[in-house]
Amino acid sequence: MNEIPSRYNPKETEDKWYKLWEENDLFSAKANPSKRPFCVVIPPPNVTGILHMGHALNNSVQDILIRYHRMKGEESLWMPGTDHAGIATQNVVEKSIAKEGLKRQDLGREKFIERVWQWKEQYGSTIIRQLKKLGASCDWSRTRFTMDEEYSKAVKSVFVALWNKGLIYQDVKVINWCPRCQTALSDEEAPHHELQGNLYYLKYPLSDQGKSSSGTARSDYIVVATTRPETMLGDTAVAVNPKDKRYKKLVGKSLILPLVNREIKIIADSMVDVKFGTGAVKVTPAHDPNDYALGKKHKLEFINVMHPDGRLNENAGDYAGMDRFEAREVILEDLKEKGLLEKIEPHALSAGHCYRCHTIIEPYLSRQWFVKMKPLAAPAIEAVKKGKINFHPRRWTKVYLNWMENIQDWCISRQIWWGHRIPLWYCLDCKKEAFASVETPEKCRACGSGNIKQDEDVLDTWFSSWLWPFATFYWPNLQGQSPSGTVPSDDLKYFYPTSALVTAPEIIFFWVARMIMAGFEFMKDKPFSDVYIHGTVRDIEGKKMSKSLGNIIDPLDIINEYGADALRFSIISITAQGQDVFLSQERFEQGRNFANKIWNASRFVMMNLDPGQVKTDLCVFFKKEDLSIVNRWILSRFYSALKEAGKKLDTFKFNEAANLLYSFFWHEFCDWYLEVIKPEIKARQNQVVMFKVLEKFLRALHPFMPFVTEEIWQRLNSQGQSLSGTVPFESIMTEPWPHTQEQIIDKKLEKQAESVFAVVKEIRNLRSSIEIKPEDKISISAFGHTKAKQKLLEANKGSIINLAKLGSLEILVSSARPKSTISAVTEDIDVYLHFSGLLDAEKEKEKINGKIKELQRFIGAKVQRLKNPDFIQKAPEEIVEKERSGLEEMNNSLKRLEKMRNELL
RNA sequence: GGGCGCAUAGCUCAGCUGGUUAGAGCGCUACACUCACAUUGUAGAGGUCGAAGGUUCAAGUCCCUCUGCGCCCACCA
């Protein structure tokens, strides 16, 4: 057995097994009415994506779910794919052609899109390859892309369906505009971040007419406060609160807009906050959502002063052509010169930022397409309220509902090229209303003219992502060509609704909520039953990992250095329910060490395994009573850990499941069990139990650490059961997740075994307290205060000698203290270490006194509790009983300790 | 302005529906390379569970208030 190296090397196993799994088609799933379906659709990573820690966490969780359910005998499908990520991908390709000195406009729309496809062919599967390194057991034969032909058809169908229902409309509104990407964004795509800016106080002079009639006006101008002074060029009114006494007389009068010399009215509206700034607001209806509303209400003029790229346009007069921020400085300068800049105050404000390029967005008046969301939201709200869909952890339910109940219409048109072009056509001849069509039309529906033109805009990427749980199954046609052949048409029916969705909190609005709405609207059913929201991956200081901060830990580096199993296990074991994940490089050592521990324990088992005998003995039924206490103990412990871990997995508590298996294996199986059986490892029952427990443990752990468990399982079985590399290929992947055997779990027995271990621990403790060398064989005497304990000592004498490295163990017949000993107590058992050297009685006494004091404290608390009549009366009987027996035990220990101390005198 | 989360050992965090003496990993100290593993073993130090109230026979655990961090949402110009 020397050929097993003493260190586990993931590099030699991971790629090998992944390849075999793939070659043997173990990831694929198909509709199988005799089995329960289990389905997870992957949150499709962007085609431009490269694997980061967020992906690693997200996909580890999904793979655990899928592998677990697959092993539980469910037909488990993990549907993979990528997202075309309109803006992000277009940006990447624009950067790439910029190296050739080209802009997308130089190429033209068609050529540019061709270049994007080329880029996608070349780099688009990077992330898929990386997911494979992680061990992801997706059914790759089904890999989908949101721009696939069939998928595009689904997108168009959905657009047409909503159009026909009257849920899509066009409007001119102030929307979020990214001057860098030059497109409209939805509200979700323009998250607000705080900025340290200024509040500028500008003086707007009253016009002559205004001045003359206001004899009591304190001054001949009104001061307005703004954070974006450059927008003043587009002002068409100043608004005040009608109740504001300061301005009451001025309402209806006019002002002269400085620099532009436009006459603008002073209007009154209750929307204006009297307390903010000066109580007078400049109104720029084309560049602010609030002002837009005011503009509509008061029928003001809408003056757009900006080009789509953020430069000021011809309406800005002298400032035309300047960038918005440059213009701001110049305008302030000019106002100052004219004495119209009253003051500047520092002011924290929050502004929308483009979620793709982080540019400050500009509220911008433009014509866009919108989806009416309220009707779609209603069933999606109800489903969650009624518990048809459950969030884990539950608190996200509120976040979801709050958003859904205040949902705004969705701006879906984007002024970019890469994406699903809006399936709307305009007739250039009859100029009637636009019409929607799934198939590309040749003629105008109204007049039959062939002179028609498709809308230039593309749809928001999320307008395709929200169909992911069913469009990936070739809805609405239900059949299509996957990379590996025709997909059967009953798959959707079988796998939908899918089972669980795993994602990060920031995706709830973008994707989760919308999938739920799309599910009910188009499939008449929820898209999934459970939503597991995991935390955000952060660095050790709590900062989000990002390239710009330079605090990235690359999962591929970790895989390379520690192995994919280590990565998976470490990241899962610290991912508490929905808490953010704080990572540092060292974290992965835990996973690596665990893999190594499993490796070596297995190595030890295999080195000592008699394959032939185990093979025959596996079929032998060992009667419980015939098994040694330690064998019964490890079986009981194993099955109870298994039972708990299963419960945790079923309730999305992955870290708890992982940690249960970890501490069972390391601290019970390795630290105690293997050590106890070591001297008699060839005994038939030991052989069978250690083999069984290890083999089942590997299966239980497989969803978490697929590679190392497969490698060992294969080696183990090639010994124990001759499964070695036989055809057909057998894999731990498709073995059942072990069943719990309740009848073997025996808590009483566990306690017995553990009291033996406690004796061992006390002996070790004594040994180290007087600094006896480990190689010195010491003599121990022990006395059990009950018959049962005496018997237990007798029965486990050998184990104690072995574990505590004793020269001899004498079991006393009376509680009298042997001479020249130091002592310790455990529950019901006294332990004496024979000591020939000089005994420092004082030191020994001190130690015992310390223990006595501690014990007295606890006893005091217990006595207090038991003296309380309310406690006796109101606490449950069993608790009171527990307290009583606990007190009794403690008193016993106390007496024994006191006796020991007194004997020292 | 609303909403949510977190404050427990030096660090990072577990502690489920309240019930014996509050746990883990890392780090630290001492000892040990005895034939599975130094990516290891054994032993140990280290906590009045953020603060103040309250409910209860009993509170890290439930309620209220406060403090400090963090996040999300919202049209504060």
Image (tube, rainbow, N blue to C red):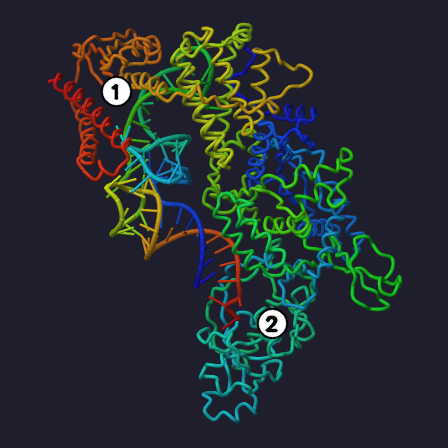
The chain letter under disc 1 is A
The chain letter under disc 2 is A
**Position above or below: B27 against A118:** above
Asked which quadrant contains residue A337, the reply is bottom right
- Few, some or many residues within 10 Å of mark 2 (<14, 14–19, 20+): many
Residue at the image position 27 percent from the left and 8 percent from the top: A809
Q: Quadrant of the N terminus of chain A?
A: top right
Task: Judge whether residue A562 can be spotted in this image.
Answer: no
Residue receiving disc 1:
A826
Query: Is A618 placed left or right of A867 in the picture?
Result: right
Residue at the image position 89 percent from the left and 63 percent from the top: A449
Q: Residue flagged by tag 2: what amino acid is it?
A: Tyr
Q: Earlier in the sequence, mark 1 or mark 2?
A: 2
Residue A292 tag number? 2
Instruction: Report helix, strand or loop for mark 1.
Output: strand
- Few, some or many residues within 10 Å of mark 1 (<14, 14–19, 20+): some
Query: Is A398 placed left or right of A330 in the picture?
Result: left
